[in-house]
Image (tube, helix red, strand yellow):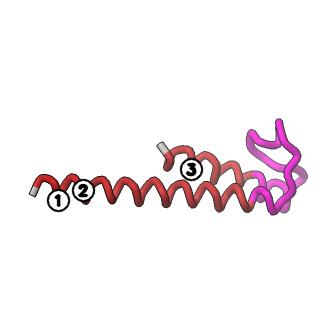
Amino acid sequence: MRGLIGFIVMIQGAMGFIGQVFFDKAWGLLPHWFNLPSPAYVGLFAAGAALIAWGERARKLKQQEERSGAA
């Protein structure tokens, strides 16, 4: 679940940053509710990537525990 939420946050951060820096206004869903500066969108992208990494690490640890418990 963390990976899915991280992916959504990462995409929103990327779309907001790219839209705000290279085009007229930020893209995505967040600009409808919040007026964020460009560095905040970079932070959202990084937070999303961290959530994905955290989720993947937890999934791998769970798989290792299942393998070691079965052996």
Q: Amino acid at mark 1?
A: Ser
The label on residue 68 is 1
Q: Earlier in the sequence, mark 3 or mark 2?
A: 3
Residue 48 shows which numbered tag? none
**Mark whose residue sits in front, 3 or 1:** 1
Q: Where in the figure is residue 15, as x and y percent of width and height?
A: 72, 52
Between 61 and 21, the one nearer to me in the picture: 61
Residue drawn at x 27%, y 55% is: 63
**Mark number displayed over residue 7:** 3
> Disc number at residue 65?
2
Q: Which residues are magenta?
A: 16-41
- Between residue 47 and residue 69, name the one nearer to us: 69
Residue 17 placement (x, y as % from top left): 78, 58
Tell whether 14 sits left or right of 61. right
Do the residues under discs 3 and 1 have CB atoms within 8 angstroms? no
- Residue 40 part of the magenta segment: yes
Q: Are marks 2 and 1 in contact (CB under 8 Å)?
A: yes
Q: Amino acid at mark 3?
A: Phe
Q: Secondary structure at mark 1?
A: helix
Q: Is residue 29 above or below residue 47?
A: above
Considering every residue shown, the one lying at the far top of the view is 33
